[in-house]
Amino acid sequence: MAWVAFIALTVIGLVVTISHKKANEISALKVEITNVDDREKIVNEKHIEEIIYKQLHSSLVGTSLKDLDISAIERVVRADPYVGEADVYLDIENRLIVNIRQREPVLRIKDLKGQDYYLDQSGHFFSWTKNYTPRVMVATGNIPPYQENFMEMEKSLLKDLFQINNFLVKDKFWSRMIQQIHVNNYGEFILVPDIGPHKILLGDANDLQEKFSKLEVFYREGLTYMGWNAYDILDIRFKNQVVGRRI
């Protein structure tokens, strides 16, 4: 009977050892993308898992907790151009949770060099992808190449473009009305509405509130009587007036 008891104690000891070992290891890797639904994902969970495996040469499952470097994992994930924020932590079941917020585009730009890219809410650049086409404003025309510090520059056409777009998307009326911003060869901004054949000659990015206020009045009072097809150009560059060119 003694040898039976010895075997039983040995088995129990192994079970306890294995359980203790597993209690000190990562049990699973779980990626969560929290700010978008499946239709709006630029990145998916598998993509993040592949980044971790490629950069850290491990899936991390089974890694000892004492060897876990959460800061390193966050740096690797945040380095992806489509990731805005990343937070990594362990839950009570020792699952490694990688919680990310992908970058949210606010403007798509097709510049004069043929580059096609997005800007997010902070002006961060990330490339266009055929797997993801969000409904955002499109800017075309004589737009210079992207410069990383454009937001800090005293004069920048791209900064003015970003400012105009931010004004439009924050306004309930104009965010629905304007579908495209075009930059002509003189560096002037031309807006393409969603309704009617006309285009809006905005000029520069100064006095946006005044320009759009008078245009809204013209829309509500002028075009109501003249009709949406009466003009091909509405010029709002000049103070206190809207100049329309008849078709």
Image (spheres, rainbow, N blue to C red):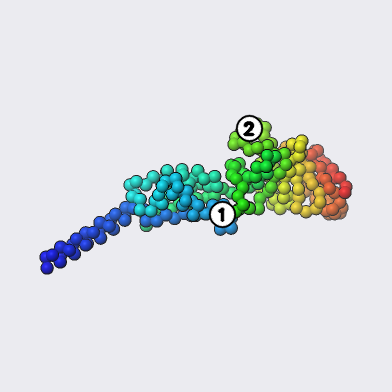
Residue 28 located left or right of residue 133: left
Mark 2 burial class by Cα count in 10 Å: few <14, some 14-19, many 20+: few
Camera-nearest label, 1 or 2: 1
Give, as a three-letter code, the residue at label 1: Lys
Q: Nearer the viewer, residue 186 or 104?
A: 186
Residue that label 1 marks: 41
Mark 1 burial class by Cα count in 10 Å: few <14, some 14-19, many 20+: some
Question: How much space separates mark 1 and mark 2, taking CA atoms?
Answer: 32 Å
Residue extending furthest toward the bottom: 1
What residue is at 15 percent from the left and 65 percent from the top?
5
Give, as a three-letter code, the residue at label 2: Met
Residue that label 2 marks: 153
Instruction: Kindly check if marks 1 and 2 are in contact, taking CB atoms under 8 A apart as contact.
Output: no
What residue is at 81 percent from the left and 49 percent from the top?
198
What residue is at 65 percent from the left and 31 percent from the top?
154
Q: Is any part of residue 209 visible from this angle?
A: no
**Which x, y percent locates residue 134?**
63, 53
**Which x, y percent locates residue 231?**
85, 49
- Label 2 secondary element: loop
> Looking at the image, is 12 positioned above or below residue 174?
below
